[in-house]
Amino acid sequence: MTETKTPKATPAPPAGPYANVAFCGIWERTDTWFGACEELRKAGVKVFHILTAQEYVDKAYALGYTHDQVLYLRKDEALAAPFSEEDFDLACEFERRSASKIKHYLAMERFLRAEPWGVSQKYILYIFRKILDFVEKNDIQLVSGEPSTMHDLVALLICHATGRHYSAPFDIRFPIQRFVMWEGEGDVVPIITGAKTPEDVEPEFIEMAKEIRERVLNKEKMKYVANRTSAPSIGLPYIKRVVRGVISRATTAKRDANIYTLPLMFTHHKYHMIPINYRLNKLQWNSLFDQPVEGERFVLYTLNYTPEHSVDVLAPYFTDAYEVIKNIARGLPLDVKLYVKEHPNALGIRGPKYLKALKGIPGVKLIDPYINSHDLLNKAEITVSLSGTISLEAALYGKKTVILSDIFIHRFSTCLFTEEPWTIGAMIDMEWPEVDVDNDIRQMAWFLSNTFEGTVVDRITSPEGVAPENLKKVAFGFFTLLRAIADGKVVPKQVPGSTAPIGSAP
């Protein structure tokens, strides 16, 4: 694989306010931020952290951060504070400035959305005021994190309302270790630090795109789609995990809003049911799952792992898989089945009762999760996903594919975007865009030119994420972004109403 090499010398760090950056902590990925930030701090960048977990607040202090450099957001403190009409009115004004909706963000957030509205509203207003004061006091011009939690989403709203910068770093889906920085909560437009347009792409990225496409066509898997090799453990290790979870939630959920309370652990999230559901599904395998029928016409839809950023944030209006599948199926011709494929890694997230309900929708076949998806997408009339990698693979094959979220994948020639799943049946016989391999390669190359070497995946998923060499690569990506901001090459996301001077009152 052709790779660009990380230069030995990083770009000169910016001076003044453009050297001030805050990172929003999110579970174990916070360790990656801490490691990369050590490289930034050595070069003179002023780093700040917005945290919700006592564990990481303690780590920050141990690394030499001062109390002024760490914003600790506490749920118990939020609920004890009086309701502020002033903060409520200001939050409403910031909604208008940023063209965002706080309730929409709340619906994306897997933890706080399960709480009563009175709890959620108090916490949101508390973190809104705390984060706003923090970024203004420290003249922070860039906030970065994963917009999956409420403090991150509120920080994003504040940045967009006040003309600050926000970046959401994520590993890319192609089978190569690189990460991209998105300018908002969606995977729509990368922050441009490389080629400005597909026409400006350098040859090395064209070659990289060609190699990646060939690897996919040779059935190499995209990132995060490796099949589970063993059943989720049960027995003593399982009991220990449940007990740890109970103790953790009993002791920390009152302070940290990014963790389920003890009752919600058993009634809402139900992670403890995954090993049990997995085994129940295995026991009923032959009655649950079907094999593809040779020559049968079908539309392919793949289920997502949930809850997950790729569903809750990228496709927030389609979080109910049953309703999505029902609406696709109801619009298909009589002689076209809907093949629904469970992801092998998600076995256990949904139990047999739920899977049987999906299978009971007229015209739906629940396909064996271990059937090769590449074989299916090559035979499907259309491949459909919320925001999934399967649509990206189908696009690289030049096959008809539809996504239900407005993300970068629809730049490929044979990929269409719709928010009306019931219309997919009508698309089967319509005139479809011609396959344009040159366009697809150039679009991919443009995207790759605006990515960086390294991984920002948490240390639990990938221990390599906190390896010294990787942390230097991640830091280099942020150096590049900060330098581009300071030089005026990257401007804040332009949204209606966000023209007020930074830090000014509405």
Image: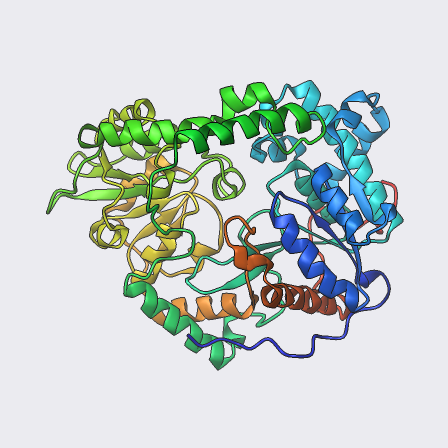
Colour logic: rainbow
Quarter in which the C terminus is drawn:
top right
Q: Residue at (69%, 45%) from the top-left corner?
A: 156
Task: Out of 491 and 220, give the one closest to the viewer.
Answer: 220
Quadrant of res 409: bottom left
Q: Residue at (34%, 36%) from the top-left corner?
A: 347
- Counting the numbered discs, the total is 0
Q: Is residue 189 visible?
A: no
Query: Is 170 left or right of 296, judged from the image as shown?
Result: right
Quarter in which the N terminus is drawn:
bottom left
**Residue 298 on image: x %, y %:** 20, 42
**Residue 103 on image: x %, y %:** 64, 30
**Residue 461 on image: x %, y %:** 50, 50
Quadrant of res 108: top right
Q: Is residue 458 visible?
A: yes
Query: Is 408 left or right of 423, judged from the image as shown?
Result: right
Q: Residue at (26%, 54%) from the top-left corner?
A: 374
Q: Residue at (47%, 81%) from the top-left corner?
A: 203
Query: Is 384 left or right of 223, judged from the image as shown?
Result: left
Q: Looking at the picture, does residue 305 appear above or below residue 323? A: below
Task: Out of 420 and 444, give the one closest to the viewer.
Answer: 444
Q: Looking at the picture, does residue 488 appear above or below residue 356? A: below
| Residue sitting at the far bottom | 203
**Residue 79 on image: x %, y %:** 76, 22
